Amino acid sequence: MTSNTLVNKATADSSARASDLSILVILSALMSFSSISTDMYLPALPTLVDELHTDIGLVELTISTFLIGFSLGQLFWGPISDRLGRRLPIAAGLLLFVVGSIGCATSPSIGQMLGWRVVQAVGACAGPVLARAMVRDLYPRERSAQMLSILILMMAVAPLLGPLLGAQMLTVWSWRSIFWILAIVGLLALIALLALPETLAATHRSSEPLGSTLRSYLSLIGDPRLNVYAVSGGFYYGGCYAFIAGTPFAYVDYYHVSPRAFGLLFGVNIVGLMVVNLINTRLVTRLGSERIFRLGTWIAALSGIALAVDAKFGWGGVPGLAIPIFCFMSVSGFIVANSVASALAAFPKQAGAASSLLGAMHYGSGVLSAAMLGWFADGTPWTMGWIVAAAGVGCLLTALLQSRSSLADGKLQQAPC
C-alpha cells in the first residue's frame, strides 16, 4: 500500500469520525427534549402554585399531561417519517415544541398551561423517536446499539444540568423565563437540523397510505422481533418512573434527607447510567447486544427484589434504598440501547413506526407506574419498592420467555440494511 493511499485512507477515516460526531451531537440534543422540558422547570413548581393561584395537585398535573402527550405523540411521527423521510417531521415537531413553549411562557392560568404542555410534548417527542430511527437508518444492529449508548451518554447531561439551570433562571427572572429558554433551544435545534443529512433514502420509504397506520401498528405489536424488546423495555421504564416519582417521598419525607443530599443521591444514578453506557459501547461489538441485554435484565430483576426487601423491612436505611436503586438505574446502559437497536434492526422500512411504538410503550408504562405509586401509597417506601421489583422481574421474564420462543422460530435474525 502506497503512502498516498494510506494518507487518503486516514483522511477518509478522520472525515467519517467527524461526521459521526456532528450527527451524534445533533441527535443527542434531539433526544434530550424530554428531560429538558420537565427537569428545567421542576424548581419552579412551588412558584407556579402561587403565581397561577392554583393548588399543587394541578401543578403536578403539568408533568403527567406532558408525559401522556409525549407518549401518544410518538405514534403520530413515526409513520409519517417512514413515508416522508426524517428531517421534515423533525422540523415540524420542533416548530410545534417552540409554539407550545411560548404558550406555556405566556399562560395566564393553569388550565391554559396544561393545554400548552400537551402541545409542547407532542412536538418534543418527534426528536427522540426519529433520532432512534435515524440511528437505525445509518448503522447495523451492533453498531447502532453502540451509537445509541453514546447518545444516551451525551444526553444524560440534561437531567443533571436542567434543575440547576432552572433554579438559576428563577433567581434572575421568573418561571416564565424557563419556557422562553426552551423556545430558544427549540429554535437552535431547528437551525442545527440544517446540518443533519436525510438518512432515509427515497427507495427505502414506505408507500403505505397513512390511513393504514393502525394496521401497521397491529402487525408490529404481533411481531415477536419487536414485542420481546418493547414489552421488556416497557417493564424497565415502569420501574424507572416509579423511582423518579417515589424517591422524593422516600428520601426527603420518610428518611428526612436534606434537599441537597437528595440532589446528590439522584445525581449519582445519572453518573452510574453514564458509566454503564460507556461500558456498553466497548462491549457490545464483542459480546453482542442480545447477550448484554439479557445481563441487564438479570441485574434489574435482582436489584429490584433487593430494593423491595430493604423497603419492606427498613434494612439499611437510606443506603438500603440507594444501593439497589443505583444498580437498577445504572443498568439502563445495558437494557435501553441494546433493546432499541435489536427491536429496530428487523424493520428497516418501518423504523419510524417501530420506534414510535417502542417509545409509546416505554413512556406509557412510566405514566402507569407513577399512577400506581399514588394509588397504592401506604406512607412508606414499600410501594415504590414492590413496583420497581415487579418491573424488574417482568423485564427479565419477558426477555427470557419471549426471546427463547423467538429464537427457536428463527425470528430474531437481523434484517439486511
Image: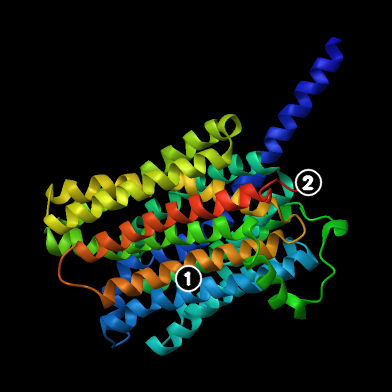
Q: Quadrant of the N terminus?
A: top right
Q: Residue furthest top?
A: 2
The front one of 205 and 120 is: 205
Q: Is residue 30 left or right of residue 213?
A: left
Label 2 sits on a secondary structure element that is loop
The type of residue carrying mark 2 is Pro
- Label 2 crowd bin: few (<14), some (14–19), many (20+), radius 10 Å: few
Label 1 sits on a secondary structure element that is helix
Question: What residue would you read off at disc 2?
Answer: 416
- Label 1 crowd bin: few (<14), some (14–19), many (20+), radius 10 Å: many
Location of residue 127 by image quarter: bottom right
Q: Is residue 242 above or below residue 332?
A: below
Which residue is depicted at the point 52% across and 71% down? Answer: 70
Count of picture labels = 2
**Residue 41 in view here:** yes
Location of residue 395 by image quarter: bottom left
Q: Are marks 1 and 2 in contact (CB under 8 Å)?
A: no
Location of residue 285 in the rendering, given as x and y in whole percent from the top left corner: 60, 32
Location of residue 150 by image quarter: top right
The front one of 327 and 411 is: 411
Location of residue 8 in the rendering, given as x and y in whole percent from the top left corner: 82, 22
The type of residue carrying mark 1 is Gly
Which residue is depicted at the point 86% across and 59% down? Answer: 202
**Residue 153 in view here:** no
**Between tags 1 and 2, which lies in front?**
2
Q: Is residue 257 above or below residue 289?
A: below
Question: What residue would you read off at disc 1?
Answer: 364
The front one of 40 and 122 is: 122
Which residue is depicted at the point 47% across and 34% down? Answer: 279
Q: Earlier in the sequence, mark 1 or mark 2?
A: 1
The front one of 129 and 221 is: 221
